[in-house]
Image: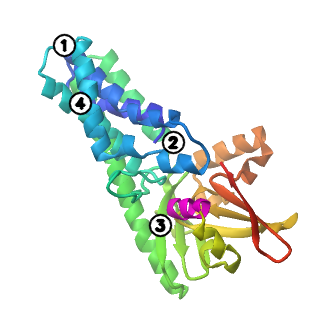
Amino acid sequence: MDTPTHGLIGRLAARVIWPEKAQNGLVNVVTVCSVLPDLDVLLPGGGLEYLVSHRGVSHSFLGVGLMALVVAWVAQKLGVRSTSFWQVYAASLFGFLTHIFFDLVTTFGTLVFTPFSDYRMAWDTLFIIDPYLDLLLIGTLLVGWLTRLGKVGYRVGGGLVVGYVVVAFFITGVGHLQLRHWANSQDIEILQTAVMPAPFSPLHRRGMVMSDNSVYWVPMTIWDGVNGDVQVFHSALTDERLKPLWDVRAGEIYRWFTRFPIVKVLDDQKNILLVQDLQFMVIPDRLALGWLGRWVLALALDHSPAVLERRNFALEIELDDDGKIQKVTYLD
């Protein structure tokens, strides 16, 4: 989730528990802790190494448990003394845990078990930027702050946020049933599936199916299931030209990070292969987006017509005349 939304979530969650002005210290602690994990973007290192460090130790259960101790100590030194150290610690930990939860519901993946495991957990429920959620959070905080509803406003708004997330989980669950039904009806051998949120479109999903040699991109809606043109890509994992890639450091990191890696030959340079993760590709199918998603895409195209050609989290592979890998470049 984007950092400002994390802050709004932390603020509202704290106000639901501590709505009174006398409890502002604890509310501020939760708010600060709900955004602190994203400071890992300031860590040294870039390129593929960034994929290893981002959403790593600062987003792990062990990491936030230790960081909450530091924050609680600093908070008490700065004046949050109306409660015990362990109450401040609990508030700090609560703020950190809201951050972890709302990163888990996105698709990027979070290393919650670092340093004991490098498993990337992702629940694929909400898009990383969700304006509907932001409006709900901002509206609730303003109602609680500026009106007499106060505690009631915060708690009603908090209930609506919880309901929004629960509905998103439900839509994703239905999407999995729809996607597997479609794949079985097409006699596709399923090795891996995912149902991911579409940008700015809560009722739309992007289904992905990996089979032996192909990866399928499947536009979906909660009402109609598969709805639109299915696109098929060649799997990077079964491409003979890329076998040596997975044995070097760049390939190991990329294989670990990606979930649906596909490969294609650049049209203008037949000795250049482009390896991308299907979940990060922009595919302009209007049926995979709601009205807001289509409007945002249209604005983006007006501002930069090349937006659909962006290559995020991709590898550019240069081959020699014999088809052997000569150079690997990470594109972020």
Q: CA distance from mark 2 to mark 4?
A: 30 Å
Point out the residue furthest to the bottom here: 187
Q: Position of residue 89 (x, y in %)?
A: 20, 29
Q: Position of residue 6 (x, y in %)?
A: 40, 35
Q: Work out whether 220 lies above or below 20.
A: below
User: What mark, if any, has residue 129 been given in the picture?
Assistant: 2
Q: Is residue 229 left or right of residue 198?
A: right
Q: CA distance from mark 1 to mark 2?
A: 33 Å
Q: Nearer the viewer, residue 241 or 263?
A: 241
Q: Main secondary structure of the magenta part?
A: helix
Q: Position of residue 220 (x, y in %)?
A: 53, 65
Location of mark 1 (residue): 22
Mark 2 or mark 4, earlier in chain: 4
Q: Nearer the viewer, residue 74 or 92?
A: 74
Location of mark 4 (residue): 69
Which tag is nearer the camera, tag 2 or tag 4? 4
Point out the residue furthest to the top here: 79
Location of mark 3 (residue): 194
Which amino acid type is marked by label 3? Answer: Ala
Point out the residue furthest to the left here: 84
Q: CA distance from mark 1 to mark 4?
A: 23 Å
Residue 35 shows in this picture: no
Q: CA distance from mark 4 to mark 3?
A: 37 Å
Residues in magenta? 249-257
Q: Quadrant of residue 317?
A: bottom right
Which tag is nearer the camera, tag 1 or tag 4? 4
Q: Residues within 10 Å of mark 4 (few under 14, many from 20)?
A: some
